[in-house]
């Protein structure tokens, strides 16, 4: 019942996002979100980051990453208003302050299947791309070792 109560907040929430940069990838039974430095910091301090994809008919698909003291594993919830990925607050606090790249988990589905959940720090590309602002992204690990970019 608690999950249903949590999903109802989509109906009441005024969505405010940092820059709608949170990147979402859904492929088969996997969800992957990549967060910029500012988003990781916001998740750490405020407990929530969100983004929105708008469609021509005026509808929106909203997605969020939430840090929760009540969570022990990463979980995903889908409602008619959007997607919420909830992470354990202790994991978020540690992840935000160390070089750890991701938080991952699996959520059981019907018939023994699993939903893979992956939240990652967003790295700048090794080769610059025209028109792309990467100033708020993490330095790519290979660029530190002298590889890439040039």
Image (cartoon, rainbow, N blue to C red):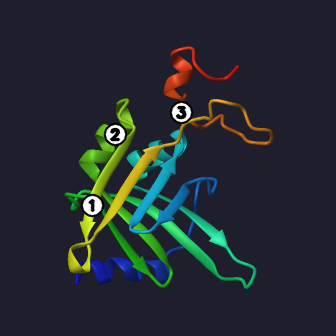
| Residue underneath mark 1 | 106
The x and y percentages for residue 40 are 46, 44
The x and y percentages for residue 54 are 68, 73
Q: Is residue 69 left or right of residue 122?
A: left
Residue 71 quadrant: bottom left
- Marks 3 and 2, how far apart at CA: 13 Å
Q: Is residue 128 above or below residue 88?
A: above
Report the residue at 62% width, 35% height from top: 125
Residue 101 quadrant: top left
For the residue pair 90 and 121, the one nearer the viewer reads as 121
| Residue underneath mark 2 | 95
The x and y percentages for residue 20 are 62, 57
Quadrant showing the N terminus: bottom left
Report the residue at 70% width, 77% height from top: 55
Quadrant showing the C terminus: top right
For the residue pair 55 and 69, the one nearer the viewer reads as 55
- Give the mark nearest the N terminus, 1 or 2: 2
Which type of secondary structure does the marked residue at label 1 adopt?
A: strand
Q: Residues within 10 Å of mark 3 (few under 14, many from 20)?
A: some
Q: Is residue 126 above or below residue 70?
A: above
- Marks 1 and 2, how far apart at CA: 18 Å
Q: Is residue 146 left or right of residue 65?
A: right
| Residue underneath mark 3 | 138
Which type of secondary structure does the marked residue at label 3 adopt?
A: loop
- Give the mark nearest the N terminus, 3 or 2: 2
Closer to the eye: label 3 or 1: 1
Q: Residues within 10 Å of mark 2 (few under 14, many from 20)?
A: some
Q: Residues within 10 Å of mark 1 (few under 14, many from 20)?
A: some
Whether pointer 1 and pointer 2 mark residues with C-beta atoms closer than 8 Å, the reply is no
Residue lying furthest right: 130
- Give the mark nearest the N terminus, 3 or 1: 1
């Amino acid at each position: 019942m608690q999950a249903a109560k949590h999903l109802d907040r989509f109906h009441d929430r005024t969505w405010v996002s940092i820059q709608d940069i949170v990147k979402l990838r859904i492929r088969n039974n996997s969800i992957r979100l990549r967060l910029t430095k500012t988003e990781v910091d916001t998740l750490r301090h405020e407990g929530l980051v969100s983004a929105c994809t708008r469609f021509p008919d005026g509808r929106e698909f909203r997605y969020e990453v939430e840090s929760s003291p009540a969570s022990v594993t990463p979980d995903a919830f889908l409602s008619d208003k959007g997607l919420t990925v909830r992470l354990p607050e202790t994991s978020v606090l540690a992840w935000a302050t160390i070089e750890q790249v991701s938080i991952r988990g699996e959520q059981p589905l019907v018939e023994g299947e699993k939903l893979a959940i992956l939240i990652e720090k967003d790295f700048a590309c090794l080769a610059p791309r025209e028109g792309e602002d990467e100033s708020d992204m993490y330095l790519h690990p290979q660029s530190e070792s002298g590889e890439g970019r040039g």
